[in-house]
Amino acid sequence: FDDVQEQLRASDLLREGLGKGYVVALTLAPRTPAWLRSLGLQPMSLGLDLRGGVHFLFEVDMDAAITQRLDVIAKDLNRTLREERIRRNVRVVGNEIRIRLGDAADLDRVEQLVRDSDELLEVRRANVGGEEQVIIRMTADQIRERQDFAIQQNTITLRNRVNALGVAEPVVQRQGVNRIVVQMPGVQDPAQAMRILDATATLEFRLVCEGENALEAQRRGRAPLGCELFSDRQGQPVLLKRGAIVTGDQLTDASQGFSEGSPAVYVKLDSKGADEMLRTTRENIGKPMAVLFVEQSRDIVIQNGEEQYITRTEREVINVATIQGVFSSSFQITGVDVVEARDLSLLLRAGALAAPIYIVEERTIGPSLGQENIDKGVNAIIFGLVCVMLFMAIYYKGFGVIADLALLTNLVLIVAILSMLQASLTLPGIAGIVLTVGMAVDANVLIFERIREELRNGNSPQASIHAGYAKALSTIADANVTTLIAAVVLFAFGTGPIKGFAITLSIGIITSMFTSIIGTRAVVNFVFGGRNIDRLAI
């Protein structure tokens, strides 16, 4: 397309004509000439502010991460106590797990079982409602560890989802304590990207409560003991047993396909999930099992004049089928359309989020604005380069021309090293290059002024050249090393644009020292070495 507006109009027409069964995504293709591509050459990687694309800043719900971990612990403890034939009621209340026992004589035994399962958990007794209960809490170290895990796992999951979208050169990195930055250059459809990235969809497999009237439970507004009330896609009530057989985090692979002409998702379980599914299907042949679709979202409400976030969890039964035979690690899910099958398989394959994420910031940068940034950046480099080169040539004459050659070589080396490192060039990166243009001649100015001083002291031209380079070296090294340290600190502690500036500045410092000291000395030796010179043009 010649411009973005034509691309947008074409995408609208395709969406309208193809319908919901197809996905129309907007992206940018490189304009690299065919003869360059035939040589295996690729265009230099450009950052979001130069190429255009979308930027998301996500916040991880740390409280939900702790609650999810408590749910897993409670489920494991409930299974252990069931195997020990201990009558109990295990539930998560706030930031703790409460175990109410049918027989107070089991208190000591339960406490020991909890400590055996995880010796780091805080276990105590408390009188709740007139009866002794076992209270379990996570330690401060466990909470910090879980929060770090949630950030790391969500970063990996988001990176997998971005890669599944086919985005070239994305940026997915942690920012601060509980935030993750996602940048996707070239993507012009933030809605499609957001739908995949922000999704917290997962699956649960549960047995159906037989012998219970779901309509009656819906009318009463209360499910029977041991059951939970949900709705299917037609709005009909379905009663499912509490506790999932297998959850989405136990899936190892998922792919889209068709079963008897209908869209389906083929899934594979890990060893633990496969064992649990094998045991359940063996014991429940002929009984119905349901697939529960779970998705979390966050709504913004105004309370007392301030924005408050409320987490909302939606659960929907997408499939109920009778267990015809024993199966374990591999099976299929039906009851979804083509788009849902594709998105669900992508999300399951990329991995479940360890905790819900909510968008804090969203920016879309069009390719026209990116091109404008490129034009302004290139103009700044050219203007700065021309001014510096003219000054050096006029003020230092022949030696200034040599410094100008070193300056041009320095720019070529910066671009070459950025390409070799496959680093993305950003607008702050261009600012770093402009700064390097000014800094690169500092070393030559010191050297040339030292040569002038030696000539004024009556030394010969050859001796002055040698002394100028030798005596200026320590000063040049000190100045550049201290600047390099600052650039390394910026890279280590900065994010996004700051890193881009630090990378180009660091590379520019190293290359400028090479070209200003070694490069110019080589040219000077080539021009003036081994000759009897009466005077220098400096």
Image (spheres, helix red, strand yellow):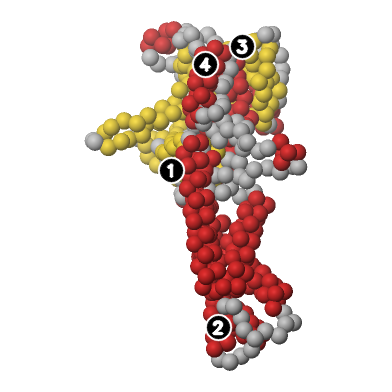
Mark 3 or mark 4: which is in front? 4
Q: Quadrant of residue 522?
A: bottom right
Residue to which mark 4 is pinned: 13
Mark 3 or mark 1: which is in front? 3
Residue to which mark 1 is pinned: 125
In the rendered structure, which disc, 2 or 3, sits on the residue that comes first in sequence? 3
In the rendered structure, which disc, 4 or 2, sits on the residue that comes first in sequence? 4
Give the crowd class for mark 4: few <14, some 14-19, many >=20 residues within 10 Å.
Answer: few
CA distance separating discs 4 and 2: 71 Å
Q: Secondary structure at mark 2?
A: helix
Residue to which mark 2 is pinned: 452
Q: Secondary structure at mark 4?
A: helix
In the rendered structure, which disc, 1 or 2, sits on the residue that comes first in sequence? 1
- Residue beneath the point at 58% across and 40% down: 170
Q: Amino acid at mark 1?
A: Arg
Give the crowd class for mark 1: few <14, some 14-19, many >=20 residues within 10 Å.
Answer: some
CA distance separating discs 1 and 2: 86 Å
Mark 1 or mark 2: which is in front? 2
Position of 29 with respect to 431 (left or right) is right
Residue to which mark 3 is pinned: 321
Give the crowd class for mark 2: few <14, some 14-19, many >=20 residues within 10 Å.
Answer: some
CA distance separating discs 4 and 1: 65 Å
Q: Amino acid at mark 3?
A: Ala
Mark 2 or mark 3: which is in front? 2
Along the line of sight, which residue is nearer the eye, 368 or 46? 368
In the rendered structure, which disc, 3 or 1, sits on the residue that comes first in sequence? 1
- The residue furthest front is 534
Q: Secondary structure at mark 1?
A: strand
Along the line of sight, which residue is nearer the eye, 53 or 373? 373
Is residue 300 at all visible to an observer of this figure? yes
In the rendered structure, which disc, 3 or 4, sits on the residue that comes first in sequence? 4
